[in-house]
Image (cartoon, rainbow, N blue to C red):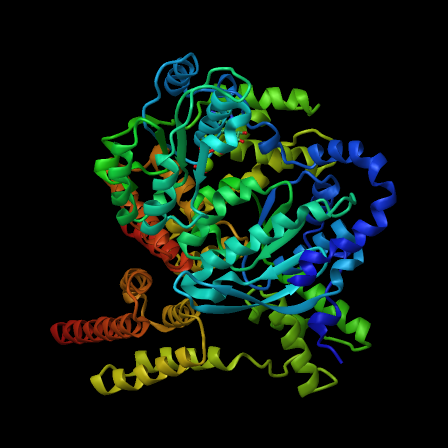
Amino acid sequence: MQAFITSNKSSLNSGESSTKQTTKKDEKKNKKSIPWVEKYRPHTVDDIVEQNEIVATLKQCLAGADLPHFLFYGPPGSGKTSTIIAAARQLFGDMYKDRILELNASDDRGIQVIRDKVKTFSQVTVSSTRSDGKPCPPYKIIILDEADSMTSAAQAALRRTMEKETKSTRFCLICNYVSCIIQPLTSRCAKYRFKPLSKEMMLNRLKLICKEENVLYEEKSLDVLVDACGGDLRRAITCLQSCARLKGNKSLALEDILEVTGIIPDHYIIMMFEVCRERNFEKIENFVEKLLSEAYCAPQVLEQFLELIISSNDLTDIQKSHICEKIAVCSWRLQDGASEYVQLLDLCYCVINVL
Amino acid sequence: MSLWVDKYRPVSLSKVDYHKTQAEHLRNLVQQGDFPHLLFYGPCGAGKKTRIMMLLRELYGTGVEKLRMGHLNFQTSNNKKLEIMSVSSNYHIEINASDAGIYDKIVVMELIKNAAQTHQLDVNGQGEFKIILLNEVDKLTKDAQQALRRTMEKYIATCRLILCANSISQVIPAIRSRCLSIRVPSPTNEEIISILMNICKKEGLSLPTELARRIAEKCDGNLRRAILMCETCKINQYPFDKNQNIVEPDWQKFIYETASIILKEQSPQNLLNIRSRLYELLCHGIPTEIIFKHLLKHLLKNCNLSVKKEIIQVAAEFEHRLHRGSKIIFHLEAFVAKLMLIETNFITSYMCDILEFS
Ligand SMILES: Nc1ncnc2c1ncn2[C@@H]1O[C@H](COP(=O)(O)OP(=O)(O)OP(=O)(O)O)[C@@H](O)[C@H]1O
Ligand SMILES: [Mg+2]
């Protein structure tokens, strides 16, 4: 570890003579080496796409209205963290560092920290002018990102502070599942749901990035990409970048998109149904093994299989409902860590039973 | 003398034996420094680790091959000391965070923060960022995975993560959203055969294709195991014979025997017997998932067709319970007891049928 940390000293020495001239170049290079997701993270509230309600509210706040406590919730990659950070930067400018306390799941957020750190920070009152004389809001913001992982004891400890210090501090809680936050906290906040981004908005954003980065694309491939990412813009941008790089020539190919997003080729899913129909146990076992040795992930199999079942024309509604129920059970079990092999077999045998 | 597995491990992305297009893609991907975090996933022995090492070499040159073993020390919030093994070079550090059990969150956090803060030392272009390689992310606690989220984003300019997992169904969506997932399928039997043939050729040995095929069929798509098996064959008997015995792992035989015992006799006495066998497997550190899978496979192969469905159903249920509960042996045993019941019911109903018939 020590060596790992100090290792660059040698390179420091060797590079020293040229440091001065290269600083500028390095800066440029540093910029370049940031992945697109970070490069295209919204810098202002205006850059946020889709989430109209919260954007409107924040704009009012920027224009001088008072800020309530916020609770943001929604699936990964819908812009929660970006939104509050962009807003805070606009509100406080270069005083950002003093006015914001950002705590996320990587920080210790036990009761003790809530009692000490958060409380002390929130009790400090701040003035309503910046150092350069311009006005700015007379409060601080405490961002509790990824609040899903806070224990309910720690959340309970927050209640009092939140109520008492409204004069000087605003809280912003962010989580994926609103059910992870205790009721007394949710009732103190203005709740905003971040929807999975709509297809159009994602397409627009991706096209913009493609243009900036000189990536050639076909409408069709972008369509597939957006469908596969299901409203997660971060994932879409990452996949876009990777696809553009894979071949080295900055153009998107359909098969790369399928590969990068982990979508299982349709013929596997159709085959899964076919082997079940044949009622050949040995074939089923072999098929499941093949599927897993290809490293396709079981939840994805379930998802695509579900689509196939629902859209199928030769199954009765009763049959469909039985299979769907089994898919639900298997998916739940997988979430608890159950073996993919056993669960997929179970599903296949259930399908046989139903047919 | 090193084992064949190590001796013939490909070191550069241009020299892989299979998944060639993927290797080509990986090379293009890292050509510019702005690639995202990566998440490699695939079954055991499919070559994930080999690919990661090749990728590092592509990025930093042969310097990454000078590896050092080290110990990292951590202190938990209740003052417990932890020691974790690490492997590192000047450019990367590799750890198995799940070794820390429920304290894995601390390990993950400290490591990333340490690595990220050393960034300013570096002005040379080459080491703009460091790589942290985390093995078995699917075994990390949910807490540790949560802790990775914002940190991964914050320090992205100074350190990239490469995560490695057997299956991504246990990786939380928020992490998956932050990484580029790279699927590494097992090599096909044909690929395994050709690799074995190649190795033997380089060793100056002649390997009958038939034997290579048998090895490929027995290794479960695990290339490492295939090469080890092949080397063992060579030690046991050379010149090769196409029908020679291929040594299977002891535990596998043991599990198969256990399955046969279950099917042979159903009694409390036998259940006790099975129990001690299960304990033996667990004591030897065989992962429960493996025990379950092989037990089931063998049972399915040897049981009567009409009870297959029931066995699968029960297996799926008990295997799931095993992950929710804490004592593994309870659930394994309950599963065996249930199997015996199914088997007994089947035999009695079968007998009844015969009696009625006559
Ligand atoms: N509404 C949006 N407008 C513009 N960009 C977005 C939006 N949502 C997501 N992005 C893109 O996705 C990236 C990740 O967004 P962000 O970090 O805000 O997600 P999040 O909602 O906090 O996700 P998580 O729940 O995983 O923390 C951003 O860097 C940005 O590029
Ligand atoms: Mg976030």
Q: Is residue A186 in sight in this rendering?
A: yes
**B239 versus B79 height, above or below:** below
Relative horizontal placement of residue A38, taking residue A300 as reference (left or right): right
Q: How many marks?
A: 0
Of residues B37 and A353, the one drawn nearer to the viewer in this rendering: B37
Quarter holding the C terminus of chain B is: bottom left
Relative horizontal placement of residue B185, taking residue A298 as reference (left or right): right
Q: Residue at x 79, y 78 (%)?
A: B205
Q: Residue furthest right?
A: A17
Kindly indicate the quadrant of the structure image that contains residue A144: top left
**A77 versus A217 height, above or below:** below
Q: Residue furthest left?
A: B356
Q: Position of residue B288 (x, y in %)?
A: 40, 70
Q: Position of residue A218 (x, y in %)?
A: 63, 22
**B277 versus B227 height, above or below:** below
Q: Residue at x 39, y 16 (%)?
A: A61
Relative horizontal placement of residue B83, taking residue B10 as reference (left or right): left
Quarter holding the N terminus of chain B is: bottom right
Of residues A106 and A272, the one drawn nearer to the viewer in this rendering: A106
Kindly indicate the quadrant of the structure image that contains residue A225: top right
Q: Residue at x 26, y 41 (%)?
A: A319
Of residues B217 and B142, the one drawn nearer to the viewer in this rendering: B142
Relative horizontal placement of residue A144, taking residue B65 as reference (left or right): left
Q: Residue at x 70, y 41 (%)?
A: B29
Q: Position of residue A231 (x, y in %)?
A: 45, 29
Of residues B152 and A50, the one drawn nearer to the viewer in this rendering: B152
Q: Position of residue B242 (x, y in %)?
A: 67, 79
Kindly indicate the quadrant of the structure image that contains residue A197: top left
Q: Is residue B46 in sight in this rendering?
A: no
